Image (cartoon, rainbow, N blue to C red):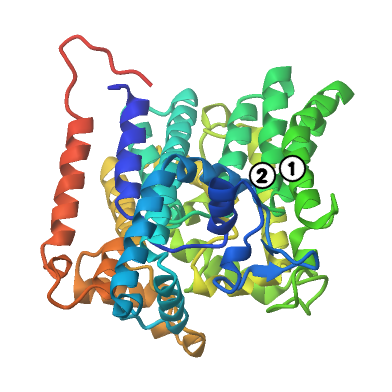
Amino acid sequence: MRSDAARVFLTGWILLAAHFATNVVREHYPAFSLAERGTLRVDPYLGLHSDIFAHSDGHAYIDNQVATSAIAAVPLFVFGPLLDALERYRREEIARNGAAAEGQFRTEYPLRERFYKEVRRRGLDLRFGAAAAITAVLVMAPLSALSAVLILWILQARGVPRGRALALSLVYALGTPVFFRSATLNNNLFVMYSVLGAFALLLVDAARASSRRIFSAGLLAGAAVAFDYSGAVALASFGAWIAFERRSLSACLTFALGALPPLSFLFATQWIQFGNLFLPAQHWMPAAHFTERGWLGFSLPQWDLFLANLFSPDFGLFVYGPILLLALVPSRVDRERRILPRSARRFLLLLSVLFLLFCASNQYARMQWNSGFRHLLPIVPLLYLAACESLARIPRAALFLLAGLAVLHEWVLSMVRFHPQPQDLGDFSRSAVVESWHRFLQGGLQFPWLSVLRQTASADAIVQAWFWPYLVVLLCALLVALVWRKGPAGMATRA
């Protein structure tokens, strides 16, 4: 537990978990149904989310893949008795006093207020809030922390000194959009985990990778598709990498066999829900925003959307993660000393270009303003590794400055989590990034879950006390200090 890997993992888990958000997202509803009733039908929740729709079979489903929900269902099932007790407590309170069904949610977002009032009326508010906490703290935060450990292992395996590798792995977790996105359950992060895992398996030498590594890379690449259809870009890119490097039919078949189990899961769940193996959930959902563009919202790449995905102040890649701009800086280091071998750099370029084109074709990306940076997450760790070509070699003072600014920027976005309203779109002063900084400078430390508790509590409730954010920061600092305390004399610290 005192190894470098364990310390990075625990530090990431503690700090990411402390910033969880209570947002109940579309991926939660099939997880609820699986954990509670063993079904993918989300009939009881119809009307609670715009991505839940009634199918022609008379049942309701979500308009996306359910692999993320299946994973989230596991801790929800384990904590089912606790969730049942919370729901029972609220329902009994409402039965005793009808006014308890009203509740209050002082928020600037009308749809959030309406959602809260509806789940409060149904007696589900405590259950939903606890479920959001469970999936963020026990699923998203530890998996993102594990991805930071993988970054650590890659950096050390490629010759980055121990201290610099430790620092860079923590900057990855806390100074990139991974921090912001880990607060809530979402399938884009699962695609990212899959891409990073497959990349790590083939990084050093794809031309000589063992059959076990190739099969495992196929398994992860196939899982990326099961989590979201954007993962098809990753699957195709990894397949091309294997084919180009190995030029072997056997290697390609091994990769394909690895991808088969998660793809079979995807097809099976589509069959269970819609009676069709291959047509995605989006095919069955009713018309929505941008479905009139192209085929169900997927068209030829749009230049304005391409630029927005990179630079929009509401969801742009380089606005939410400015440290990733260093990935564009050419490396002057000898090829043998680079973190990314030549074949890995070629793959990074291929995957990044294809993902950018895919997301510029996906018109639903225009809706990211209501949730922040999301769709380009799968290429974030690879771009970060490319940025580490510079970060691993710059002077310590420069690294301290750049890393500090990156972590502070990401912390502000993750604390405030401001998203503009439709009438604010195009107003730079009311954009997500600018307004988040404004509210941080004006209001100081805050946590998304604590903000929601305060918005739903009475003005004189104890949760309104000024000291709570500082107490949380102090507790996190103590836990992290405990993690990094010096081990017993003579104990070797290893990665």
Distance between the alpha carbons at the discs numbered 1 and 2? 7 Å
Residue 132, picture quadrant: bottom left
Asked if disc 1 and disc 2 are in contact, CB closer than 8 Å, the reply is: yes
Q: What element carries label 1?
A: helix
Report the label total.
Answer: 2
Q: Residue at 38% across / 73% down in the picture?
A: 418
Indicate the position of residue 177 as horizontal and vertical percent values: 45, 56
Residue 470, picture quadrant: bottom left
Q: Tell which of 189 and 125 is nearer to you.
A: 125
Q: In this view, does 228 lie to the left or right of 263?
A: left
The residue beneath circle 1 is 235
Q: Tell which of 367 and 460 is nearer to you.
A: 460
Q: Give the farthest residue toward the top.
A: 490
Indicate the position of residue 271 as horizontal and vertical percent values: 81, 50
Which of discs 1 and 2 lies nearer the camera? The answer is 2
Picture disc at residue 224? 2
Q: Tell which of 160 and 426 is nearer to you.
A: 426
Q: Quadrant of the N terminus?
A: top left
The amino acid marked with disc number 1 is: Leu
Q: Is mark 2 on a helix, strand or loop?
A: helix
Indicate the position of residue 213 as horizontal and vertical percent values: 67, 22
Q: In this view, does 71 lie above or below 117?
A: above
Picture disc at residue 21? none
Q: Is residue 336 left or right of residue 80?
A: right
Q: Is residue 221 visible?
A: yes
Indicate the position of residue 363 as horizontal and vertical percent values: 70, 72
Q: Residue at 39% across / 84% down in the picture?
A: 429
Q: For the residue carrying disc 1, how many other residues have a C-alpha within 10 Å: few (<14), some (14-19), or many (20+)?
A: many
The amino acid marked with disc number 2 is: Ala
Q: Is residue 6 above or below residue 415?
A: above
Q: Residue at 77% across / 29% down in the picture?
A: 255
Q: Is residue 85 left or right of residue 352?
A: left
